[in-house]
Image: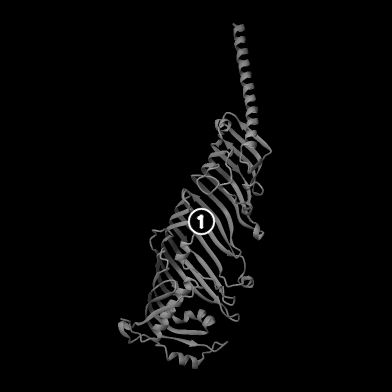
Amino acid sequence: MDFINNKKAKKILILVVLMLSVLVGVHFWAKSKVTRILEEKIPATIALKYTDLDLNVVFGNVSLHDAFITVRSEDKTKTHTFFKVKAVKLKGLGYWDALFNDRISFRKIVLVQPKITHDPTRRDKVDKKADSTKGKKVIAIKELEIRGGSLVVLDAAANDIATTVVDYDLSISDIELGPETKHKLPFDFKNFKFKGKHISTNNSPFEKFIFDELTIDEGNARVTGFHIRPSYSKAALSNVLQFERDHVALDIPKINLEHIQLNRDKNRFQVAVDQMQLQKVNLQVYRDKLVADDLSKKPLYSESLRKLPFDLLVKETTIEDGFISYAELVDSENKAGELTFSSVQATVKSISNAKDAAKTEIDVQAKFMKQAPLNLHWNFDVNNKNNALWVSGSLKNLPASILNPFLKPNMNVVSEGKIDEMYFKFQANKSVSNGEMKMKYDNFKFNILQNDSSKVNKLLTAIGSLFFKSDSEGDSKADFRYGTIEAERDQTKSFFNYLWISVKSGVVSTLTGNGEKEK
């Protein structure tokens, strides 16, 4: 019996040894095969180096340690992207695809702490028709995951860094990279998730966009801390400008975008967002009017939307509890005059350039100069080639003296009295505006100042008073005075200048005209 048992034990031992030998042999064969696949079957534009390779034959898992990856342009003359990765984990290698098909497939790829540097200027454009796809392999990845990554995008033309992401996690599903992707990106994919911190990108040589944290998940995006930071101080900006430009600083603590859809299957890239919410917007705009005017043509918003290189639809945008400050410097000896809008609540419906887009509707409520309730509504049809627009609004309970910090340095006048109510409406196109205004006011007048002085120029003020009706009492329609709005747009100025000169023309007409409503 012992002889029989010993004989069985020997057979089992021999079988185990044989199995282990086969497994070891398969392991070394597979490792050699995978090494050759990584060397020979990845696209010719990608170069891969690593210090060590681990392989689990049973599960088809491969791990590369301390990997260094470079990506070259299609003509293979310039290297534009560098990856330095602590570990690359390739899970679920499809042996059948790798050995017998023109395809490399993985269930999952994980990049641990990749440091990526990219220079887009080194990506040469090639003639796609002349670029043969023969021999190129397809790489299919069910899920790509990046953990603790960082990114630097260079701006070689400016000898600067264009974009940085200090820390991010990324997950992309159903990736396919090969000679026949469905759109202009180098690969196809279905869904992605992203969470990044301390993101900075240069919008222009004059300002930088900063995201404290950005999260994108299941078609929704959330920004915690968005900022626009000027690259220069106000004085320094004026010294480098050839033509006037706004000095802009912006802070938005929270931005939410709901149901983002990206369509990559048509000739034009398409972006659609159901709702965008901006909370506690704080916008500071300063313009040095001593710098030479920029006389280039400024498009109205409808024209700007039509000229976008992609299709856009944002169904609704809301701004909650915003603050806007606009300051102009017109005299180097005086402080810049400032206008403020606080407690800003705004709704914008249908920001779109689609051919069947609904009218864009904007409603704004705010406190002008922290006191006077302001309401503004305007709309336009993006497909109206004449850039037609309609504007209406109201302003109430405005003590004239609160305008003096802006009027005195900018126009050398001060005002007194009170505007109880002001209503205006006008329609406009790309050239002219026409409409009407009515005002109820009390003892409202302008005092013209002496040059370089705070003293009133009594002669000029007295002459000016001959043309102004100082109050609306006793006029028709419950003490309202009426005027007309007529303005010609300066196409080198913005929409807000167009709005201002239209309202100003109505104020002048109301104060100086007969005060009666036109029939």
**Nearest the eye: 409 or 245:** 245
The quarter in which the C terminus is drawn is bottom left
Q: 417 above or below 181?
A: below
Amino acid type at circle 1 is Val
Residue that sits furthest to the front in the current view: 130
**Nearest the eye: 46 or 229:** 46
**Nearest the eye: 378 or 228:** 378
Residue that sits furthest to the bottom in the current view: 459
Q: Is residue 370 among the parts visible in the rendering?
A: no
Q: 440 above or below 163?
A: below
The quarter in which the N terminus is drawn is top right
Q: Is residue 416 among the parts visible in the rendering?
A: yes
The percent position of residue 117, horizontal first and vertical second, equals: 64, 50
Position of 256 with respect to 199 (left or right) is left
Q: Residue at x 54, y 39 (%)?
A: 141
For numbered disc 1, what is the local secondary structure? Answer: strand
**Nearest the eye: 200 or 34:** 34
The percent position of residue 472, horizontal first and vertical second, equals: 36, 85
Q: Residue at x 59, y 11 (%)?
A: 8
Q: 488 above or below 221?
A: below
Q: Residue at x 48, y 58 (%)?
A: 255
The percent position of residue 279, horizontal first and vertical second, equals: 47, 61
Pointer 1: what residue?
223
Q: Could you say which quadrant of the image residue 4 lies in?
A: top right
Coloring scheme used: one colour
The crowding category of the residue bearing disc 1, from other C-alpha atoms within 10 Å (few below 14, some 14 to 19, many at least 20), is many
